[in-house]
Amino acid sequence: MLAPALVGKTESKPRARKRLMRRVLRSDPAQEYLVYLPPTVAEQSRLLVAVHGVSRNADQQVRLLSAYCDQYGVVLVAPIFQAEDFPKYQQLGRAGRGKRADLALNAIVAEAAAVAGIECESFYVFGYSGGAQFAHRYLMAYPHRVAAAVVAGAGWYTLPNPTRRFPFGTRMSKSLTDLRFDAEEFLSVPVTVIIGADDTATAGVRSSPKLDSEQGTNRLDRARNWVTRMQAAAADHHMQSRVSLVELPRSDHSFRRAVLRAGLGSQAFQALFGPAGQAVT
Protein backbone atom coordinates (compact mmCIF):
# COMPACT_ATOMS: atom_id res chain seq x y z
CA MET A 1 0.00 0.00 0.00
CA LEU A 2 1.36 3.36 -0.96
CA ALA A 3 1.88 5.94 1.76
CA PRO A 4 0.55 9.46 1.29
CA ALA A 5 2.94 11.73 -0.60
CA LEU A 6 4.56 13.86 2.06
CA VAL A 7 8.12 15.04 1.73
CA GLY A 8 9.99 17.12 4.27
CA LYS A 9 6.92 17.80 6.43
CA THR A 10 6.96 17.65 10.20
CA GLU A 11 4.01 16.30 12.11
CA SER A 12 1.47 18.86 13.22
CA LYS A 13 -0.90 18.73 16.14
CA PRO A 14 -4.31 17.30 15.16
CA ARG A 15 -7.06 19.90 14.97
CA ALA A 16 -10.76 19.51 15.69
CA ARG A 17 -12.85 20.82 12.79
CA LYS A 18 -16.39 21.23 11.54
CA ARG A 19 -17.52 17.82 10.34
CA LEU A 20 -19.49 18.29 7.07
CA MET A 21 -19.37 21.18 4.64
CA ARG A 22 -21.24 21.73 1.39
CA ARG A 23 -19.15 24.09 -0.71
CA VAL A 24 -18.93 25.68 -4.13
CA LEU A 25 -15.70 25.95 -6.05
CA ARG A 26 -14.23 29.46 -5.87
CA SER A 27 -13.23 29.38 -9.53
CA ASP A 28 -16.66 28.06 -10.59
CA PRO A 29 -19.54 28.82 -8.16
CA ALA A 30 -21.81 26.48 -10.13
CA GLN A 31 -19.64 23.53 -9.06
CA GLU A 32 -20.67 22.00 -5.73
CA TYR A 33 -18.82 19.47 -3.62
CA LEU A 34 -18.98 18.00 -0.11
CA VAL A 35 -16.15 17.79 2.40
CA TYR A 36 -16.36 15.52 5.45
CA LEU A 37 -13.74 15.86 8.19
CA PRO A 38 -13.01 13.17 10.80
CA PRO A 39 -12.92 14.26 14.46
CA THR A 40 -9.27 15.30 14.16
CA VAL A 41 -7.36 16.44 11.11
CA ALA A 42 -3.58 16.74 10.84
CA GLU A 43 -1.42 18.04 8.01
CA GLN A 44 -0.54 14.47 7.06
CA SER A 45 -4.14 13.19 7.07
CA ARG A 46 -5.09 11.32 3.92
CA LEU A 47 -7.72 12.50 1.45
CA LEU A 48 -10.26 10.23 -0.23
CA VAL A 49 -12.37 11.27 -3.21
CA ALA A 50 -15.71 9.43 -3.49
CA VAL A 51 -17.47 9.72 -6.86
CA HIS A 52 -21.21 9.17 -7.17
CA GLY A 53 -23.15 7.22 -9.77
CA VAL A 54 -25.66 8.59 -12.28
CA SER A 55 -28.22 9.08 -9.48
CA ARG A 56 -25.88 11.82 -8.17
CA ASN A 57 -26.04 10.28 -4.66
CA ALA A 58 -23.02 12.12 -3.25
CA ASP A 59 -24.88 12.89 0.00
CA GLN A 60 -25.69 9.20 0.50
CA GLN A 61 -22.10 8.20 -0.14
CA VAL A 62 -20.81 10.67 2.44
CA ARG A 63 -23.41 9.57 4.98
CA LEU A 64 -22.63 5.86 4.60
CA LEU A 65 -18.85 6.21 4.39
CA SER A 66 -18.33 8.83 7.12
CA ALA A 67 -18.01 6.28 9.94
CA TYR A 68 -15.09 4.67 8.11
CA CYS A 69 -13.50 8.10 7.66
CA ASP A 70 -13.72 8.59 11.43
CA GLN A 71 -12.16 5.18 12.01
CA TYR A 72 -9.24 5.78 9.64
CA GLY A 73 -8.82 9.54 10.12
CA VAL A 74 -9.50 10.26 6.45
CA VAL A 75 -10.80 13.48 4.90
CA LEU A 76 -13.59 12.69 2.43
CA VAL A 77 -14.31 14.82 -0.64
CA ALA A 78 -17.38 14.12 -2.80
CA PRO A 79 -17.75 16.10 -6.05
CA ILE A 80 -21.24 16.65 -7.42
CA PHE A 81 -21.26 16.34 -11.20
CA GLN A 82 -24.65 17.71 -12.18
CA ALA A 83 -26.21 16.05 -15.24
CA GLU A 84 -26.73 19.28 -17.16
CA ASP A 85 -23.07 20.30 -16.77
CA PHE A 86 -21.40 16.87 -16.90
CA PRO A 87 -23.42 14.55 -19.16
CA LYS A 88 -20.28 12.48 -19.83
CA TYR A 89 -18.54 12.68 -16.45
CA GLN A 90 -18.08 8.89 -16.41
CA GLN A 91 -15.75 9.31 -19.40
CA LEU A 92 -13.96 12.31 -17.81
CA GLY A 93 -15.77 14.61 -20.25
CA ARG A 94 -16.02 14.94 -24.02
CA ALA A 95 -15.34 17.93 -26.27
CA GLY A 96 -18.63 19.67 -26.98
CA ARG A 97 -20.49 17.55 -24.40
CA GLY A 98 -20.35 19.66 -21.26
CA LYS A 99 -17.59 20.38 -18.77
CA ARG A 100 -14.49 18.29 -18.11
CA ALA A 101 -15.05 16.28 -14.94
CA ASP A 102 -11.35 15.46 -14.57
CA LEU A 103 -10.37 19.14 -14.56
CA ALA A 104 -13.18 19.97 -12.14
CA LEU A 105 -11.97 17.27 -9.76
CA ASN A 106 -8.40 18.57 -9.87
CA ALA A 107 -9.64 22.01 -8.82
CA ILE A 108 -11.92 20.56 -6.12
CA VAL A 109 -9.15 18.47 -4.57
CA ALA A 110 -6.76 21.44 -4.44
CA GLU A 111 -9.36 23.66 -2.79
CA ALA A 112 -10.63 20.99 -0.38
CA ALA A 113 -7.10 20.15 0.77
CA ALA A 114 -6.48 23.82 1.49
CA VAL A 115 -9.76 24.07 3.41
CA ALA A 116 -8.87 21.00 5.48
CA GLY A 117 -5.30 22.20 5.99
CA ILE A 118 -3.65 19.05 4.66
CA GLU A 119 -0.96 18.22 2.12
CA CYS A 120 -2.28 16.41 -0.94
CA GLU A 121 0.21 15.67 -3.68
CA SER A 122 -1.58 12.35 -4.16
CA PHE A 123 -4.93 11.11 -2.93
CA TYR A 124 -7.19 8.05 -2.86
CA VAL A 125 -10.17 7.43 -5.12
CA PHE A 126 -13.40 5.46 -4.61
CA GLY A 127 -16.12 5.26 -7.23
CA TYR A 128 -19.38 3.34 -7.42
CA SER A 129 -21.28 2.48 -10.61
CA GLY A 130 -20.96 5.53 -12.90
CA GLY A 131 -18.48 6.88 -10.37
CA ALA A 132 -16.42 3.71 -10.76
CA GLN A 133 -16.26 4.40 -14.48
CA PHE A 134 -14.89 7.86 -13.72
CA ALA A 135 -12.52 6.52 -11.05
CA HIS A 136 -10.72 3.95 -13.18
CA ARG A 137 -10.46 6.31 -16.15
CA TYR A 138 -9.15 9.09 -13.94
CA LEU A 139 -6.43 6.87 -12.46
CA MET A 140 -5.43 5.73 -15.95
CA ALA A 141 -5.14 9.35 -17.10
CA TYR A 142 -3.60 10.73 -13.87
CA PRO A 143 -1.70 7.83 -12.28
CA HIS A 144 0.75 10.20 -10.58
CA ARG A 145 -2.12 11.75 -8.62
CA VAL A 146 -3.74 8.52 -7.34
CA ALA A 147 -2.19 6.68 -4.39
CA ALA A 148 -4.71 3.82 -4.67
CA ALA A 149 -8.23 3.29 -5.98
CA VAL A 150 -11.34 1.20 -5.41
CA VAL A 151 -13.55 0.69 -8.45
CA ALA A 152 -16.92 -0.72 -7.41
CA GLY A 153 -19.83 -1.79 -9.61
CA ALA A 154 -18.72 -0.16 -12.88
CA GLY A 155 -20.98 -0.71 -15.87
CA TRP A 156 -18.13 -0.93 -18.39
CA TYR A 157 -14.41 -0.23 -18.59
CA THR A 158 -11.60 1.31 -20.56
CA LEU A 159 -9.39 -1.59 -21.59
CA PRO A 160 -5.58 -1.29 -21.47
CA ASN A 161 -5.57 -1.54 -25.27
CA PRO A 162 -3.49 1.12 -27.05
CA THR A 163 -5.12 0.33 -30.41
CA ARG A 164 -8.64 1.30 -29.30
CA ARG A 165 -9.58 4.95 -28.90
CA PHE A 166 -10.48 6.24 -25.46
CA PRO A 167 -12.86 5.56 -23.70
CA PHE A 168 -12.88 1.99 -25.11
CA GLY A 169 -9.08 1.76 -25.03
CA THR A 170 -6.09 3.97 -24.27
CA ARG A 171 -5.41 5.37 -27.72
CA MET A 172 -5.64 9.18 -27.75
CA SER A 173 -9.14 10.53 -28.38
CA LYS A 174 -9.83 13.46 -30.70
CA SER A 175 -12.18 14.86 -28.05
CA LEU A 176 -9.58 14.72 -25.25
CA THR A 177 -6.35 15.48 -27.05
CA ASP A 178 -4.49 16.58 -23.90
CA LEU A 179 -4.75 13.17 -22.24
CA ARG A 180 -2.01 10.58 -22.66
CA PHE A 181 -2.06 7.09 -21.20
CA ASP A 182 1.18 5.50 -20.02
CA ALA A 183 0.56 1.82 -19.31
CA GLU A 184 3.55 1.35 -17.04
CA GLU A 185 2.42 4.29 -14.92
CA PHE A 186 -1.25 3.37 -14.54
CA LEU A 187 -0.42 -0.31 -14.04
CA SER A 188 1.67 0.78 -11.03
CA VAL A 189 -1.37 2.12 -9.14
CA PRO A 190 -2.92 -0.30 -6.61
CA VAL A 191 -6.51 -0.91 -7.73
CA THR A 192 -9.17 -3.05 -6.06
CA VAL A 193 -12.24 -3.89 -8.13
CA ILE A 194 -15.26 -4.67 -5.95
CA ILE A 195 -18.38 -6.18 -7.46
CA GLY A 196 -21.52 -7.80 -6.10
CA ALA A 197 -21.67 -11.52 -6.82
CA ASP A 198 -25.33 -11.01 -7.76
CA ASP A 199 -24.74 -7.90 -9.88
CA THR A 200 -25.75 -9.72 -13.06
CA ALA A 201 -28.76 -7.72 -14.27
CA THR A 202 -28.34 -6.12 -17.68
CA ALA A 203 -30.90 -3.31 -17.34
CA GLY A 204 -29.11 0.05 -17.45
CA VAL A 205 -25.83 -1.51 -18.58
CA ARG A 206 -24.40 -0.09 -21.80
CA SER A 207 -24.59 -2.73 -24.50
CA SER A 208 -23.40 -3.23 -28.07
CA PRO A 209 -22.28 -6.36 -29.93
CA LYS A 210 -18.60 -5.34 -29.78
CA LEU A 211 -18.70 -4.15 -26.15
CA ASP A 212 -20.51 -7.30 -25.03
CA SER A 213 -18.07 -9.57 -26.88
CA GLU A 214 -15.05 -7.73 -25.44
CA GLN A 215 -16.20 -7.26 -21.85
CA GLY A 216 -19.25 -9.43 -21.15
CA THR A 217 -22.94 -8.62 -20.82
CA ASN A 218 -23.25 -7.73 -17.12
CA ARG A 219 -21.27 -5.89 -14.44
CA LEU A 220 -19.96 -9.06 -12.77
CA ASP A 221 -18.56 -10.50 -16.00
CA ARG A 222 -17.13 -7.13 -16.99
CA ALA A 223 -15.38 -6.66 -13.64
CA ARG A 224 -13.77 -10.08 -13.91
CA ASN A 225 -12.80 -9.41 -17.51
CA TRP A 226 -11.19 -6.03 -16.77
CA VAL A 227 -9.15 -7.41 -13.89
CA THR A 228 -7.92 -10.23 -16.14
CA ARG A 229 -7.03 -7.74 -18.90
CA MET A 230 -5.18 -5.45 -16.49
CA GLN A 231 -3.26 -8.36 -14.99
CA ALA A 232 -2.30 -9.57 -18.46
CA ALA A 233 -1.18 -6.05 -19.42
CA ALA A 234 1.07 -5.95 -16.36
CA ALA A 235 2.60 -9.28 -17.37
CA ASP A 236 3.17 -7.96 -20.90
CA HIS A 237 5.14 -5.08 -19.38
CA HIS A 238 7.08 -7.46 -17.09
CA MET A 239 5.41 -5.92 -14.05
CA GLN A 240 3.73 -7.46 -11.03
CA SER A 241 0.01 -6.76 -11.24
CA ARG A 242 -1.44 -4.42 -8.62
CA VAL A 243 -5.06 -5.02 -9.64
CA SER A 244 -7.22 -7.36 -7.55
CA LEU A 245 -10.86 -8.43 -7.44
CA VAL A 246 -13.25 -8.72 -4.48
CA GLU A 247 -16.71 -10.24 -4.99
CA LEU A 248 -19.33 -9.43 -2.35
CA PRO A 249 -21.59 -12.43 -1.64
CA ARG A 250 -25.35 -11.91 -1.98
CA SER A 251 -24.89 -8.36 -3.22
CA ASP A 252 -26.57 -6.79 -6.25
CA HIS A 253 -26.23 -3.22 -7.58
CA SER A 254 -27.59 -1.27 -4.60
CA PHE A 255 -24.92 0.96 -3.06
CA ARG A 256 -26.85 1.23 0.20
CA ARG A 257 -27.29 -2.53 0.59
CA ALA A 258 -23.69 -3.14 -0.44
CA VAL A 259 -22.44 -0.91 2.39
CA LEU A 260 -24.96 -1.86 5.09
CA ARG A 261 -25.27 -5.59 4.39
CA ALA A 262 -22.38 -6.78 2.25
CA GLY A 263 -19.39 -4.99 3.77
CA LEU A 264 -18.52 -2.70 0.86
CA GLY A 265 -17.32 0.09 3.15
CA SER A 266 -15.00 -2.07 5.24
CA GLN A 267 -13.65 -3.84 2.15
CA ALA A 268 -13.00 -0.56 0.36
CA PHE A 269 -11.26 1.17 3.26
CA GLN A 270 -9.12 -1.85 4.06
CA ALA A 271 -8.08 -2.08 0.41
CA LEU A 272 -7.15 1.60 0.36
CA PHE A 273 -5.67 2.12 3.83
CA GLY A 274 -4.89 -1.27 5.35
CA PRO A 275 -6.27 -2.85 8.54
CA ALA A 276 -8.73 -0.85 10.62
CA GLY A 277 -7.28 1.51 13.18
CA GLN A 278 -4.31 2.60 11.09
CA ALA A 279 -5.22 6.29 11.07
CA VAL A 280 -2.57 8.87 10.29
CA THR A 281 -2.69 11.59 12.95
Image (spheres, rainbow, N blue to C red):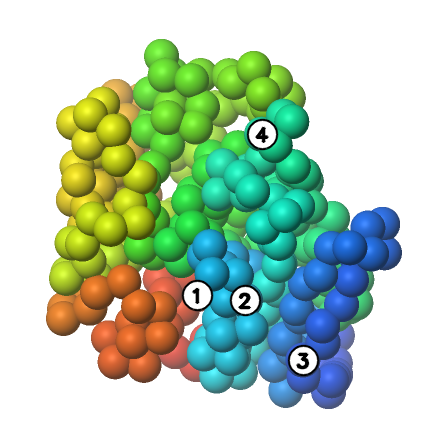
Q: Specify the quadrant that holds the C terminus.
A: bottom right
CA separation in Å, label 3 and label 2: 13 Å
**Label 4 residue SS:** loop
Residue 35, quarter of the rendered image: bottom right
CA separation in Å, label 3 and label 1: 22 Å
CA separation in Å, label 2 and label 1: 21 Å
Disc number lying in front (2 or 1): 2
Crowding at label 3, few (<14), some or many (≥20) Cα neighbours within 10 Å? some
Q: Nearer the viewer, residue 85 or 112?
A: 85
Mark 4 sits on what residue?
A: 94
Q: Position of residue 278 (x, y in %)?
A: 46, 76
| N-terminal-most mark, 3 or 4 | 3
Q: Is residue 100 above or below residue 264?
A: above
Pointer 3 with pointer 4, Cβ within 8 A:
no
Mark 1 sits on what residue?
A: 273
Q: Is residue 153 above or below residue 225?
A: below
The amino acid at mark 1 is Phe
- 147 relative position to 120: left or right: left
- 276 relative position to 221: left or right: right
Mark 3 sits on what residue?
A: 20
Mark 2 sits on what residue?
A: 58
Q: Position of residue 219 (x, y in %)?
A: 23, 48
Pointer 4 with pointer 2, Cβ within 8 A:
no
| N-terminal-most mark, 4 or 2 | 2
